[in-house]
Image (cartoon, rainbow, N blue to C red):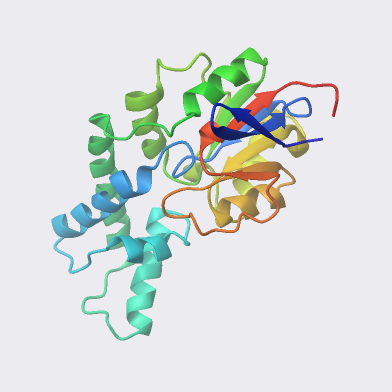
Amino acid sequence: MTFSCMIKDGSIGKSLINLRSYDIVLFDLDGTIAETEAIGHLPAFNCAFAIHKMSWSWDSSQYRELLKVAGGHERLKAYRAMLESTGQLKDYHSDEFLKKVHQSKNEIYARLMSTGIVEPRKGFFSLIKKIWHLNRQWGVVTTTSQSNWDGLWNNSIKGRVDIEPKIIICGEKVERKKPDPEAYILAAKQLNIPPSKCLVIEDSDNGAKAAHAAGMDFIGVKSHFFANDHLDNAKVIVEELSHIEFELSNLY
């Protein structure tokens, strides 16, 4: 069973999580491992719009709403549908055209990542070290593109962790994105373990619903764009990754 309590580490309250029941900790990517949305994805989208001579431009408040739709290509189609429904669509862009825009956006995002501009969130490296010390594994389950994970991994994480991820599930591997549980179910299947042996860390309601529907316990962590999400059914909700403390205990 998972138990959480508040302990004091200096002036910071931490949630103590027992990993005894789990074999692996699965991290979401965007907003969870790193605050990639505001620094990386949003400016990359706007740059792609300009390159393709589109009239579209997203600000932070618009993007916050659009993030309720998982997947970049899906987000573009949702925005097109919104413009159509409100009579604001000036130029119709086909699915194929939007796919090209999304590809451009991912290329721009990769170039941004190559600068090292995005760092993992406070506490991420400490959690990976503790997972290693406790003889557990970690992985990534995201429905963003593989190239987006590769950009963050190669430029901001690789070589700075004691143990590499046991599994990586990205959007190309599934037909249905979060909040559908397909990505998490696939992870458990490929790991050959029951879903109950996986502990998930998620920052959004879509991710929380996916983990819960897959039969996995999860920790909720607040993030910039999803600060107001409820993260229902979380074992515990924290403001930062640094507020999580893992242990192994036979007492509970």
In the rendered image, residue 167, in percent from the top left (x then y), is placed at: 57, 28
Q: Is residue 157 left or right of residue 249?
A: left
- Image height check: is 117 above or below 234? above
Q: Residue at x 55, y 25 (%)?
A: 127
Report whether residue 89 is seen: yes
Count of labels in the image? 0
Report whether residue 181 is seen: no
Residue 4: quadrant of the picture:
top right
Q: Residue at x 47, y 40 (%)?
A: 29
- Image height check: is 75 above or below 213? below
In the rendered image, residue 16, in percent from the top left (x then y), is placed at: 68, 31
Q: Is residue 32 left or right of residue 13?
A: left
- Image height check: is 220 above or below 167? below
Of the 4 image quadrants, the one containing the C terminus is: top right
Q: Residue furthest front?
A: 11
Of the 4 image quadrants, the one containing the N terminus is: top right
Residue 160: quadrant of the picture:
top left
Q: Residue at x 22, y 56 (%)?
A: 46
In the rendered image, residue 244, in percent from the top left (x then y), is placed at: 60, 32
Residue 90: quadrant of the picture:
bottom left
Q: Is residue 175 left or right of residue 216?
A: left
- Image height check: is 79 above or below 160? below
Q: Residue furthest bottom?
A: 87
